[in-house]
Amino acid sequence: MIEILGSQRRLCGGMTRRDWLQIGGLGMLGVRLQDYLNLRRLQASSSLPGFGKAKSCILLLPYGSPPQHETFDPKPDAPEEVRGVYKPTSTSVPGVQICDGLPQISRVMDRLTVIRSMTHPYPLHCTAYVTSGIPDYTPELETRPRDPRHWPYIGSIVDYVEERRQAPVGIPRNIALPWKMNSRGGEAASVEAGPYAAFLGKAYDPVLTDFTEKGVREIVKQRPYGTKHQVLDPYAGISPDARFSLRGVQLARQVTLDRHLRRRTLLEQFSAARRALEDQPATRNLDRFRRMAYSLLASPQINRALDVQQESARTRESFGMTLFGQSCLVARRLIEAGGKFVTVFWDEYAYLNTDWDTHWNQNHRLKGWLLPGFDAAFSGLIMDLEQRGMLDETLVVWMSEHGRTPRFNSNAGRDHWSRVYSIAMAGGGVRKGEVIGRSDSLGGDVLEHGVSPKDILATILHLLGIDAHTTIPNQVGQPMPVAGTGQVRYELLA
């Protein structure tokens, strides 16, 4: 940096005349004003608590939304139509209780921070709202994942920012499993908004894995009006031989990898010539698609990371031999191999509204496979990361779109509720053994310390070393804040 001595008189915004002379000198070197301001902001952020403590993040998204009463915020003194059939149980944190359907998680509570006062105004399946900076939401946006009004998914933000900081790695920076969200919910399913890159371009969507195996345990999925279905649901149990793969990344049978890479060399020459003539966003996205595809085809790291059979039977069983449990184990393997942001969905399967979207028959689902699957996978992931010395640098977040109503409905279920709900975080610079916020006696409203999902996004980015006030350009070049209105919640940080 060139420094030119001059007056220390401060100008508007607190900058000195010397600062402006410095910027002018940088301009001669091809450094833009915005680059300089971003650097100053990054330097300021790096001195704040928790900044950059996490090298990576595993985001666990149970689509449909778990009930706060039967997970992290039981209400034993409430009427039966509120508290339900489950009871509270003590945890490894003195004085803190959670649902007794989560005995293994109760033993790792001293590694977690639980937030019991999450709140926002949209009781919808608003995955896109809680995982992006978008300021407002509507039911229309929920069912239009490529609507131009959407903002980028947090994993896409991390990918976009990190790409400008470091060279490509063998593992994609933004990867999601076990499959494309909402793609296995039966004939009535529609792919909903959420894990998409919006105005960053499709090339920054999460790289998807695939899982095509059937489950090994038959469970009853009950729909409204009494209809019942016998389903081999992988979220209830899978075979130890079941495998994950990359979605849509494979060579034609007659094309060897060497032959394919020779084709790549010629294609890259044409691409370079075209970029020299026209460097447009659409062209850049297409080139990034190609680079990513070639990288995934040629790199052995990603396939090794997906090969969960390399783990011992004891380790695999500690996560639970279910699709969610083994997906969490693969997520750890991806992070261990160099991944930056991994998303694990607990998605609908076979029929809509028959998993975490518990509008009806909630107790049957919770007891049968939801709570046991969550209990084993989440506790297994936390303990496995800790035993490998990875937990302090890996942020783990269990977060849904909303919570569920304080009272049961006439179908023995709980409906959508976003006025208060609970999430859990661990590792990567988060405090240990803490409960943040409080709901009222019915678990229906925030009593104290409300936290927005935008604040969680800002805090995740901060822990990953990304200034939560960073802006990125939208379709027309306007600067958009990566976490929307979110603010870093320092009370969550160690």
Image: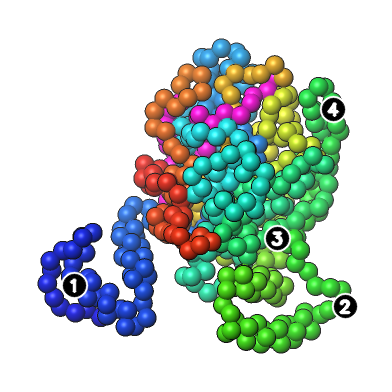
Looking at the rendered image, the disc whose residue lies closer to the viewer, 1 or 3, is 1
Which residue extends farthest top? 79
The amino acid pointed to by label 4 is Lys
Q: Which residues are magenta?
A: 412-439
Say which quarter of the image contains residue 380: top right
Q: Earlier in the sequence, mark 1 or mark 3?
A: 1
Q: Position of residue 440 (x, y in %)?
A: 46, 21
Q: Secondary structure at mark 3?
A: helix
Compare residues 240 and 358 and report the one nearer the observer.
358
Q: Is residue 78 above or below residue 326?
A: above
Mark 1 residue crowding within 10 angstroms, few (<14) / some (14–19) / many (20+): some
- Camera-nearest label, 2 or 1: 1
Residue beneath disc 3: 306
Mark 3: amino acid:
Leu
Query: In the rendered view, does 295 fall on the left or right side of 110?
Result: right
Numbered circle sitting on residue 254: 2
Q: Quadrant of the N terminus?
A: bottom left
Nearer the observer, 490 or 378: 490
Circle 1 SS class: helix
Q: Along the polypeptide, which appears first: circle 4 or circle 1?
A: 1
| Residue on which the image places disc 4 | 228
Q: Amino acid at mark 1?
A: Arg
- Residue 248 is drawn in which quadrant? bottom right
Give the CA distance from mark 4 to mark 2: 46 Å
